[in-house]
Structure formats: structure tokens, C-alpha cells
Amino acid sequence: MSANQLDQLKQFTTVVADTGDFESMKAYQPRDATTNPSLILQAAAKPEYRHLIEKAVADTKSSGLSGQALIDAILDRILILFGLEILNIVPGRVSTEVDARLSFDTEGTVAKARQLIAAYEAEGHSRSRILIKMASTWEGIKAGEILEKEGIHCNLTLLFSFAQAVACAEAGVQLISPFVGRILDWHKATTGKDYQGDEDPGVISVKEIYTYYKKFGYTTEVMGASFRNTGEIIALAGCDLLTIGPSLLAELQASTEPVERRLSPEEAAASDIQQINLDEKSFRLMFNEDAMAVEKTADGIRKFAADIVKLEKLIQELL
């Protein structure tokens, strides 16, 4: 019997679950799992996860904090409790996201990351199994550079452009999450055209980044994210990691169509791509030239921030 597409994909690429749903993680057996404020909010709204929200409130109520400081502490505790559950399911790493409202605050991001890592370590987990997620703003990238030197590994998310990818590699961050599907969304909305497979602008973007990293020996891992269809995933077979939502994992598991490796270090090495170096001024100019990246990064930060506000309201109702 032929192997399903998910099992075939796992031969070339580390599969990561893009969900806050524990049952999905158990079903598809990814190595790692990623969460974000939107996924945590979705999970928190389900009755089966309500106990985690209530536990976070109970754990933090006696802290002596009040007002916004108490809500912030409970929010952090919710992220940690979800992360702890995930670490009991996956053999690898969990990504926990810093508050999106800190996306333009390097010092605030660093401080929050240290708090989250300290909380995981207090629960007996090594920082080697945690990735701290933050937006790929200049400030976020600089925070990642500081944290990596402390052994706190980072996942730079909301990444839509080559400029962001180059700056992340030069900062020495552990991993980046280029958003394939949201790039496709923007191009479809802008041009009115549909794109498939290798013509998909999101796929093209990740291939360019992967090629650049492998050609010039950067150790930063590339994890394609935010997929809209399995065609995008199959076109990126061979990428270091791919983080995939439950519905697309189910589609891959249900298909036995062949999956071939599409990205490889050998092909990347043969590329004629040129190396560039970016300081803050050149990064901001290059990033600003990419209208899609500017719009989608800003939109992503706004949406994640809005979902954090919704989580805060949920917490207030329990206090």
C-alpha cells in the first residue's frame, strides 16, 4: 500500500502542527507545535480547554497583583499552561508568542521573552524545547539577536519579505516562519488571478529564502507557514520545516499521490543568487519597497493584538 502524502512529506521535511488543539497534535504526531494568540483564543473558547483558563486565573490570583498587571500575568500563565500541555504531546519544541503589542519594542520583547522562559524553566522544561515567537519587525529581529546570545531561541513570525529573511539570518535567530498563504491572499486580491503550485507567490518567496540561506551557510531554519492548500505544501517539500493546520494535515493523510523533494541544499548551492547585507536603514528601505510585506506585516500585528485584547476580556470575566 502506498504511503500517504503526510508520511511521504515527513521523509524530507519536519512537520509541525499549527494549532492550539491537543487532540489534533496527538492525531498527526508532528515533531513540534506552534501557537499564536488567535489559535490560543480559538482553543480557549472550547469547553474542553476552559479548565486551563480557570487554572491560570487560580494560579495567579494570589500573586498580589491587580489591574492590568494581574491580567498580563494571567495571560502569560495561559500561554505557559498551553505550552506545557503541548510539550507533553510533541517530542520537540513549542513556539510561544510574545504579546504582538510589543512588536516595535525591543526591550519590552526581550523582557517578556525572559519571563516566559523563566516560567517554563520553573516547570522543569529546558529552554532548548521552547521557541519564543515575535514579529519580524526590525525591533523584533534585534530582540531575537539579543535573546539568541542568551540561549533563548526565537521564531520570527509574520515574515513576508526577503528583507525580513536576510535580517533574521544576519541576527542569527533559530527559525523564521514565512507566511505562504497570506502572501497568496494579497496577490490574489491585488491581481484577481489565481495561482497554483510553483507559480504561487508565497511558494516562490519561501524558495528564494531557502535558497539564500543554504547557499550562504546560514543556520537559521526556514519553516513555511500559513498554508491555503496542500499544493503549496507539496511545492515546498524539502523545506526545513512546514507548520500545517489540522484540516490540511487531514487532506495530506487522506491522499496517496506521490510527493517528491522540491527543495534541496544541493540545488541551492548551485544558485547564482547574490549575498546582501542590511543595516537598519537599508532594511527599512528594502522592506518599504515591498507593499505586500508592509501591508501584511502590519495587518498581522493588528489581528494578533486584537485577539490578545479578546483574551484579556475573557480573563476579566473570570475575575
Image (cartoon, helix red, strand yellow):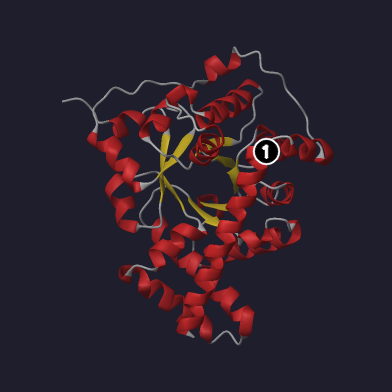
The N terminus appears in which quarter of the rendering? top left
Identity of the residue drawn at 57% across and 84% down: 63
Residue under label 1, please give it.
291
Name the residue nearer the viewer: 293 or 62: 293
Q: Position of residue 149 (x, y in %)?
A: 70, 48
Res 43 → quadrant? bottom left
Name the outermost residue toward the right. Answer: 281
Out of 103 and 268, give the one closest to the viewer: 103
Picture layout, residue 312 above or below residue 185: below
| Residue 10 seen anywhere in this rendered image of the structure | no
Q: Amino acid at mark 1?
A: Ala
Residue drawn at the location 68% of the way across and 56% of the way down = 103
- Residue 220 x, y percent position in the rendering: 61, 36
Q: Position of residue 288 (x, y in %)?
A: 74, 39
- Tell me which residue sits at (61%, 86%) in the image: 66
User: In the shown orientation, is residue 178 left or right of residue 84?
Assistant: right
